[in-house]
Image (tube, rainbow, N blue to C red):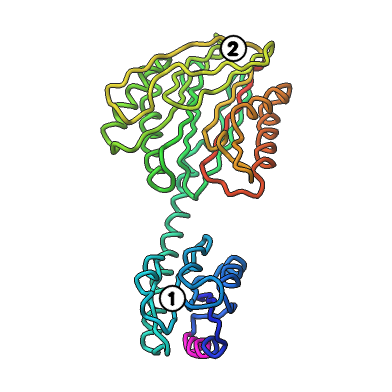
Amino acid sequence: MIRTLLVDDEKPARERLRQMLASFEDVEVIAEAVDGEEAIEKSATFSPDLVFLDIQMPGRNGVDVAASLSAPRPHVIFCTAFDQYAIEAFDVHAVDYLLKPVNRGRLARAVSRVRESLNRMAVMDRDLQSAGEVQARLFPQTLPAVTGLDYRVFSRPARTVNGDYYDFLPLKDGKLAIALGDVSGKGIPAGLLMASLQGRLQSHAPLRGDLVAALVADLNRLMSASTDSKSYITFFYAVYDWMKRSLTYVNAGHNPPLLFRADSNEPVRLSTGGMVVGLFPEAEYSQETIELRESDVLLCYTDGISEAVNLDAEEFAEARLSAVVRGNRDKSASGILDALLSELSGFSEGTTQQDDQTALIAKVLT
């Protein structure tokens, strides 16, 4: 059904339009409004698919109302006795502009355009949902068991398809490769770029082993050759060696992961590496190896976590991330991650998630 809101300050006009719409089996009038303020309020309350909107009304006029409708934005068809507002109407993306008295044929064609648009949107939504389900299966379904390491990960897309990337790859001698990335943009284009990075990483990582700088250089060269000049990936890649209890890493323009030592309140920021992946094919990278100690905690995250905002537009920020980990580092990796997500949820309550969010907690065991 096409759920419809009628907006007109004249009751006879609303009644006539309602009667005409009754002949369409797939159109349902769910509400009416008599002025601009009520139209905005009822649109937010009922989330209609379609709004029939008069232009000259008490208070806010129809063009202003159309420009102010909140997401998800309904289709708008103007019904007015005045023809001089047509250009302004289409500037606010009106589907059609009908002059009163409304002609049944013109009304039918306008509704048909809305119907076709809604059908296209439904197909796109189904395709997007399918893409999200396919992508979810690309992420690790289980976490490889690694001697001496307790780790957990959380990832939530802002849209159906995730532009964040994480992976855990078992390497020879019981080592574990840890990857975390953030693809520029959102939605399907970011998801496709993420899948491309994943495929290349999984094929090259076993060949490079501890040569993590060389691996990232390989990935950068390959991604640069197949992406446009505006696409890139911030990327953190590390190999955990349980026998040496060490972490060898490269940070390619990503938010520096934070390593919390058991005997210090100030985390070590893992920033050694180079520029983001995918922009310049000849970029060079350096790697660093850090000795790990019992009870050390590693936090890796994407900027969807640190840049999440509250209702006052204040960012969650690295300092708050650090405080949560410090205050809970005696817990397991799962406990620390749960505490972080609880703090993030309370902080951003009442807001809409604007970016993909991923966080990884790893704790060194005895």
The answer to whether residue 29 of the structure is visible from this angle is yes
Q: Nearer the viewer, mark 1 or mark 2?
A: 1
Choose between 107 and 283: the one closer to the eye. 107
Circle 2 SS class: loop
Circle 1 SS class: strand
Q: Is residue 215 left or right of residue 55?
A: left
User: Spatial distance from mark 1 to mark 2, Cα to Cα?
Assistant: 64 Å
352 versus 359 height, above or below = below
The C terminus is located in which quarter? top right
Q: Residue at x 65, y 29 (%)?
A: 320
Q: Residue at x 26, y 32 (%)?
A: 225
Q: Residue at x 41, y 60 (%)?
A: 124
Q: Is residue 19 magenta?
A: yes
Where does the image place residue 242, in percent across and percent down from the top left? 56, 14
Badge 2: few (under 14), some or many (20 or more) residues near its Cα, within 10 Å?
many
Q: Which residue is mark 2?
A: 292
Q: Which residues are magenta?
A: 16-24
Q: Quadrant of residue 28?
A: bottom right
Choose between 84 and 52: the one closer to the eye. 84
The answer to whether residue 148 of the structure is visible from this angle is no
Q: Earlier in the sequence, mark 1 or mark 2?
A: 1
Tell me, yes or no, whether the two marked residues, 1 and 2, touch with CB atoms within 8 Å: no
